[in-house]
């Protein structure tokens, strides 16, 4: 019995939290494109009715015109 009661050791089996997992995280995921017809811009918001990604009110209207079940933007 020596005066060594305060040393804390962790066994090697205690891993690091998963956020430190070495993953190939070179890029952020590619940004989703606007769902507007002929539109190639990245989306800026998601339409609350259709859940489609949209970049502008014009694209929103274009998408809604194609889907009569949706109400106006
Ligand atoms: Zn757009």
Image (tube, rainbow, N blue to C red):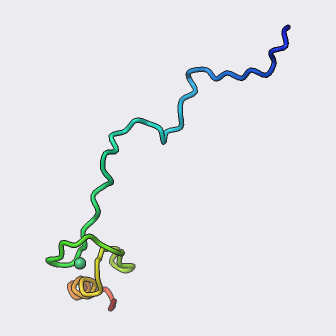
> Going by the picture, which residue comes out furthest to the left?
38
61 up-or-down from 18: above or below: below
Q: Where is residue 40 in the image (x, y as percent from the top left)?
A: 18, 72
Q: Indicate the quadrant where residue 21 lies.
A: top left
Q: Is 49 rendered above or below residue 28?
A: below
The residue depicted at 33 percent of the width and 40 percent of the height is: 24
- Residue 6: x, y in percent? 79, 22
The residue drawn where x is 56% and y is 21% is 12
Does residue 21 appear to the left or right of 57 in the view shown? right
* Location of the N terminus (image quadrant): top right
Residue 50 lies, with reference to residue 6, above or below; the image says below
> In the shown orientation, is residue 41 left or right of residue 18?
left
Residue 39 in the figure: left or right of residue 42: left
**Of all residues shown, which one is farthest toward the top?**
1
Q: Residue 2 lies in what quarter of the image?
A: top right
**Vertical arrangement, residue 63 with respect to residue 30, above or below:** below
- Could you say where residue 38 lies in the image, as x and y percent from the top left? 14, 77
Please identify the residue farthest to the bottom as the structure is shown: 72
Say which quadrant the C terminus sits in.
bottom left
Q: In terms of image quarters, where does ligand 1 lie?
A: bottom left
Residue in the picture at 36% in, 75% down: 45
Residue 16 in percent (x, y) is at 53, 33
Q: Can you name the residue that lies furthest to the front here?
A: 3
Report the label total.
Answer: 0
Give the residue displayed 22% in from the left and 72% down from the top: 41
């Amino acid at each position: 019995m020596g005066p060594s009661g305060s040393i804390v050791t962790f066994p090697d089996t205690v891993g690091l939290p998963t956020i430190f997992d070495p993953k190939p995280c070179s890029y952020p995921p590619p940004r989703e494109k606007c769902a507007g017809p002929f539109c190639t811009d990245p989306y800026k918001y998601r339409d609350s009715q259709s859940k489609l990604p949209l970049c502008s009110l014009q694209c929103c209207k274009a998408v809604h015109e194609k889907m009569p079940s949706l109400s106006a933007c």
